[in-house]
Amino acid sequence: MHSIFNVAHQHQDVDSKIAVALERLSQAFRVLLWEKNKTHNLSPIQIQFLVYLLYHAADQCTITQLAREFTLTPATVSDAISTLEEKKLVLRERRDTDRRVAWVSLTPEGKKTARMLSTWANVIQENIAEFDPAEKVVVMKFLMRLIESLQQAGVITIARMCITCKFFQPRAHPNSQALHHCQLLDKPLANSELRLDCPEHETMRA
């Protein structure tokens, strides 16, 4: 198989061009994260942990869950959390109900810092806003299907998207602008309303 970075092959192969474009975008995200590092003295993964903890429910905020979310070992996550503890940005606790689970929460200073850091990728959104709405929905659906495929291949660990949820009914309303249906919410969904990270997500059984 040819490498996607083989330029001569890449010029003749659309799949390679898409893969390289996504890799280039990943570079942009890395650059934006390191820019935040300069002002807050936090590593990119520490920044991502703080933002994740700010916007996700407590039952999703454990060392084990963070390891799954970011495809890291529990030991790596624990080291990063220890640094954030030293900076007084997070608290780690074990509860009597299950001493094996390490729960992580933001301190008041951690919440304040996480809110400031949570805009680190907004410049990407600002540039996306300039494009045609219909074109953006097509790209969003393509990316969701790509994420689903990579999850099935074991490359991506977690994908709480509508299209992988047991409550999702695709094309349930074929003659409507709200084409799909969510059984949990009992609500029709337009393509633009499909979620990438839904807190009520339950994985579809094979």
Image (cartoon, helix red, strand yellow):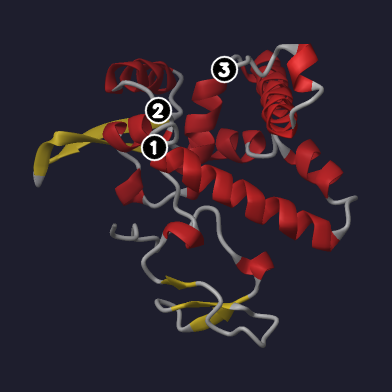
Tell me which corner region of the image, top left, top right, bottom left or bottom right, holds residue 51: top right
Q: Amino acid at mark 2?
A: Thr
Nearer the observer: mark 3 or 2; the answer is: 3
Q: Residues within 10 Å of mark 1 (few under 14, many from 20)?
A: some
Residue plotted at (41% across, 36% down) = 153
Image quadrant in which the C terminus is located:
bottom left
Amino acid type for the residue under numbered disc 3: Met
Q: What kind of element bears circle 3?
A: loop
Mark 1 secondary-structure assignment: loop
Query: Residue at position x 58%, y 85% from top?
Result: 173
Establish if 64 lies above or below 173: above
Picture quarter with the N terminus: top right
Asked whether the beta carbons under mark 2 and mark 1 sit within 8 Å of each other, the answer is yes
Give me the C-alpha separation between circle 3 and circle 2: 26 Å
The picture quadrant where one finds residue 68 is top left
Which of the two discs, 3 and 1, sits closer to the camera? 3
Residue underneath mark 1: 157
Choose the circle earlier in sequence order: 3 or 2: 3
Q: Amino acid at mark 1?
A: Thr
From where the camera sits, is residue 54 visible? Answer: no
Residue 87 visible? The answer is yes
**Residue named by callout 3:** 1
Of the pair 39 and 187, the residue shown nearer to us: 187
Q: Nearer the viewer, residue 15 or 36?
A: 15
Left/right placement of residue 197 relative to residue 179 reads: left
